[in-house]
Amino acid sequence: MTYFVTHQLGVVLSAIDEWHEFIRRETERFRALRSRLRGLDDLNHRQRALVEHALRHPDARDTIEGHQTSHNVVDETARPDRLGLMNRGLLGSKKSGRTYVFFPAAGLEQRLATLE
C-alpha cells in the first residue's frame, strides 16, 4: 500500500512540475511576442492590444463596433485600426450580414515574427 501511495504522489508531483514548466514556456513566449509588438512602431496602442488579444484568444471574433466600445473610439478611428491589421496580414475578416467580423489570421505568431 505504501508503494502505491508513494508512486501516486510521484505521479502528481511530476504533473505539477510539467505544469509549471508549461506555464514558464508560455509566459516566455508571450513576453517575446509582446516585445516584438512593442518594436513595431507603425502600430498604435489599440492595434497592439488587438493583436495581443488575438494571440491570447485565437478563436476570438470581433467587429469594428466591438473595437469602438472597448477602446472608446469613433468609427473613423476603429475602422483604420482593424483594416490596417488586416492589410498587414495579422487579422482576417469575413462578412456576416452587413457586418464585417474580424478574427486572428492563420499563423499569426509566425506572421508577427516576420514583420519589419
Image (cartoon, helix red, strand yellow):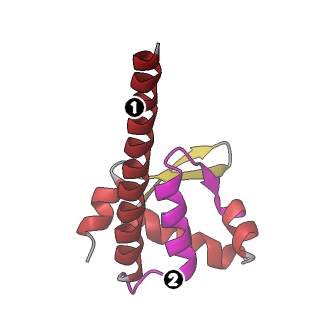
Is residue 89 visible to us here? Answer: no
- Horizontal placement of 76 versus 32: left or right? right
Q: Is residue 38 magenta?
A: no
Q: Which residues are magenta?
A: 40-65
| Nearest to the observer: residue 52 or residue 89 | 52
Q: Is residue 52 magenta?
A: yes
| Residue 81 on image: x %, y % | 54, 73
| Nearest to the observer: residue 99 or residue 34 | 34
What's under tag 1, amino acid-wise? Gly
Q: Which quadrant of the figure contains the C terminus?
A: bottom left
Question: Against 34, is 92 above or below?
Answer: above
| Residue 29 on image: x %, y % | 35, 61
- Horizontal placement of 31 versus 51: left or right? left
| Nearest to the observer: residue 100 or residue 15 | 15
Number of numbered discs: 2
Q: Which mark is residue 69?
A: none
| Residue 49 on image: x %, y % | 55, 71
How busy is the neighbourhood of tag 2: few (under 14 within 10 Å), some, or many (20 plus)?
few
Earlier sequence position, callout 1 versus callout 2: 1
CA distance for labels 1 and 2: 49 Å
Q: Secondary structure at mark 1?
A: helix
How busy is the neighbourhood of tag 1: few (under 14 within 10 Å), some, or many (20 plus)?
few
Which of the 4 quarters of the picture holds residue 28?
bottom left
Disc 1 target residue:
10
Residue shown at 45% from the left, 80% from the top: 43
Q: Secondary structure at mark 2?
A: loop
Foreground label between 1 and 2: 1
| Nearest to the observer: residue 21 or residue 89 | 21
Residue shown at 27% from the left, 71% from the top: 115
What's under tag 2, amino acid-wise? Asn
Disc 2 target residue:
44
